Image (tube, rainbow, N blue to C red):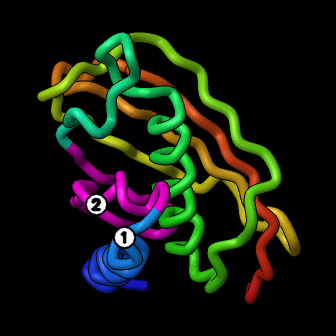
Amino acid sequence: MAGRLLLESSRSILKGLTQRGRGYDKVVDKLRVVAAADGQCTCEMVVNEDHLNAGGSLHGGMSATLVDVVSTLAIMNTGSGHPGVSVDINVTYVRPAMAGDNITIHSQCLKVGKSLASAVVDIKNQDDQLVCQGRQTKYVKSTK
């Protein structure tokens, strides 16, 4: 798929998720897709009050949600055609992101097989410092 087509496709998928307006889909409504390529997706978001834990930094559950959503976009950008179902997801937290921080979420699909796909996600702050890194494995119906 051409880069522009993947970018528009990723934006359309994200828009569909956030239009439901409930649960975790609601908290990613500020996520913007800024780049997409075969097996990759990059989004940006400004951390706001809705994304914080009691300590005032980006909530770990929110980070995991970002890993889930953006890695799914990267996997779908391989042409697999199916968002899949999470089998395993993990996040390693390195440093906090605070309200007002502009974070970048970049995901790269590592592999799409007959039934499983995996991706890695880096979440970085505006100083290009790693906030956290996540990995996800999903069960997918591969069309390849």
Q: Farthest residue toward the right?
A: 114
What is the secondary structure assignment of the residue under circle 2? loop
Instruction: Note whether 66 is above or below 63 in the view shown.
Output: below
Q: Which quarter of the image is occupied by the C terminus?
A: bottom right
Question: In the rendered image, which residue does mark 2 sit on?
Answer: 29
Q: Amino acid at mark 2?
A: Asp
> For residue 3, what is the image quadrant?
bottom left
Residue drawn at the location 87% of the way across and 71% of the way down: 115
Q: Does residue 3 appear in the picture of this structure?
A: no
Q: Are marks 1 and 2 in contact (CB under 8 Å)?
A: yes
Kindly indicate the quadrant of the structure image that contains residue 22. Answer: bottom left
| Quadrant of the image containing the N terminus | bottom left
Q: Which residue is mark 1?
A: 21
User: Which amino acid type corresponds to the residue marked 1 in the rendered image?
Assistant: Gly
Label 2 environment density (alpha carbons within 10 Å; few <14, some 14–19, many ≥20): some
Residue 83, horizontal then vertical, whole percent: 63, 74
Report whether 131 appears left or right of 100: right
Residue name at image x 45 percent, y 46 percent: 66
Give the image location of residue 58, x and y in percent. Answer: 36, 26
Residue 8 painted magenta = no
Where is residue 23? Give x, y as percent: 48, 59
Visible in this render: residue 39?
yes
Neighbour tally class for label 1: few under 14, some 14-19, many 20 plus, Cα within 10 Å:
few
- What is the number of the mark on residue 34? none
Question: Which circle's residue, 1 or 2, is located before the other in the chain?
Answer: 1
Compared with 80, 68 (above or below) is: above
CA–CA distance in space, label 1 to label 2 = 8 Å
Left or right of residue 26: residue 139: right
**Is residue 44 found left or right of 16 in the rendered image?**
left
Spot occupied by residue 119 in the image (x, y as percentages of width and height): 63, 50
What are the residue bounds of the magenta stretch?
23-45
Q: Residue at x 77, y 73 (%)?
A: 140
